[in-house]
C-alpha cells in the first residue's frame, strides 16, 4: 500500500477490480510481490508471552509480562522458548521521520545485524500514514517527510524478506499488535 501510494500507482482496490488481486497483477507483470502470505487466523488470538524490552527504549510500551534487557537490534522480542527470531523496532511519528531521514544509514546497519542472525524486523510506527501527512509538523519541509517515505521504500526493497512496516493509530494499538507479531514469528513473515 505504501509504495503504491508513494509512486502514485493505482490502489490495491483497483488491482483487485481488474486482476482479482494484487498478487495476480504481479504474476501477469512477471514480478514477485514483496509480501506473499495472508494474515493467519491465529493473529486474532491473545498471546501470553514474556516480552523482552531493550534497555535503551526511551518510552517502553506496557505488556502483561515484560523484562528489560539489552538487545543488539530492535526494541522488542520474546524470551526463552517463545523466541521466534522476530523483532520489533517501535517508532513514534517524529522518530520515524528522523530515523528514515538523517538516521537512515544507522538503521540500515541495524537491519544488517538483523539479517546476519536470520531474523525478521517489524518497524511499528505509532501513527497512520494519513495522519502523519495530515499532522506533519507546521513549518517543516514536506520534502523531509517525502524523503523518509522514500527511504522506507528503499529499505523494504533492500531487505524484502527481512522487514515490514506496520502503521498503528497509537501506543495502545502497538501494545496489542506487537506480542502477536513476535509470537507468530515466521508464520507472519512476508
Image (cartoon, rainbow, N blue to C red):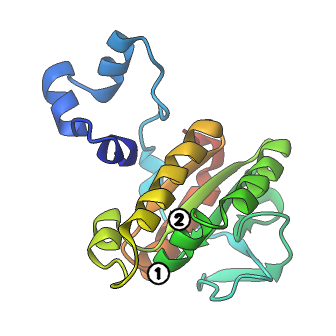
Q: Which residue is mark 2?
A: 124
Question: Residue 12's spot in the image, x, y percent?
Answer: 25, 38
Which residue is rendered at x = 51% and y = 70% of the image?
A: 97
**Residue located 49% across and 68% down the image:** 125
Answer with mark 2 or mark 1, whichever residue precedes in sequence.
2
Mark 2, residues whose alpha carbon is within 10 Å: few (<14), some, or many (≥20)? Answer: many
Q: Quick check: 28 left or right of 156?
A: left
Which quadrant: the C terminus?
top right
Would you call the spot at circle 1 few (<14 residues within 10 Å), some (14-19), or many (20 or more)?
some
Q: Name the image quarter holding the N terminus.
A: top left
**Rendered position, 97 above or below 34:** below
The residue sitting at 28% across, 65% down in the picture is: 130
Q: Position of residue 93 (x, y in %)?
A: 46, 75
Q: Position of residue 96 (x, y in %)?
A: 53, 69
Q: Which mark is residue 171?
A: 1
Residue 83 visible somewhere in the drawing: no
Secondary structure beneath disc 1? helix
Q: CA distance from mark 2 to mark 1?
A: 10 Å
- Above or below for 137 versus 11: below
Amino acid at each position: 500500500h505504501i509504495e503504491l501510494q508513494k509512486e502514485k500507482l493505482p490502489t490495491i482496490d483497483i488491482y483487485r477490480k481488474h486482476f482479482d488481486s494484487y498478487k495476480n497483477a504481479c504474476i501477469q507483470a512477471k514480478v514477485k510481490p514483496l509480501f506473499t502470505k495472508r494474515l493467519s487466523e491465529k493473529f486474532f488470538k491473545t498471546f501470553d508471552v514474556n516480552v523482552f524490552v531493550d534497555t535503551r527504549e526511551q518510552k517502553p510500551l506496557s505488556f502483561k509480562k515484560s523484562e528489560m534487557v539489552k538487545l543488539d537490534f530492535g526494541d522488542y522480542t520474546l524470551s526463552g522458548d517463545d523466541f521466534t527470531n522476530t523483532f520489533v523496532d517501535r517508532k513514534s511519528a517524529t522518530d520515524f521521520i528522523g530515523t528514515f531521514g538523517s538516521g537512515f544509514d544507522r538503521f540500515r546497519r541495524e537491519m544488517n545485524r538483523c539479517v546476519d542472525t536470520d531474523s525478521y524486523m517489524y518497524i511499528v510506527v505509532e501513527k497512520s500514514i494519513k495522519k502523519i501527512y495530515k499532522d506533519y509538523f507546521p513549518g517543516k519541509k514536506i520534502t523531509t517527510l517525502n524523503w523518509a517515505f522514500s527511504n522506507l521504500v528503499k529499505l523494504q526493497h533492500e531487505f524484502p524478506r527481512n522487514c515490514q512496516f506496520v502503521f498503528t493509530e497509537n501506543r495502545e494499538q502497538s501494545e496489542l499488535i506487537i506480542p502477536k507479531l513476535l509470537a507468530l514469528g515466521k508464520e507472519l513473515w512476508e
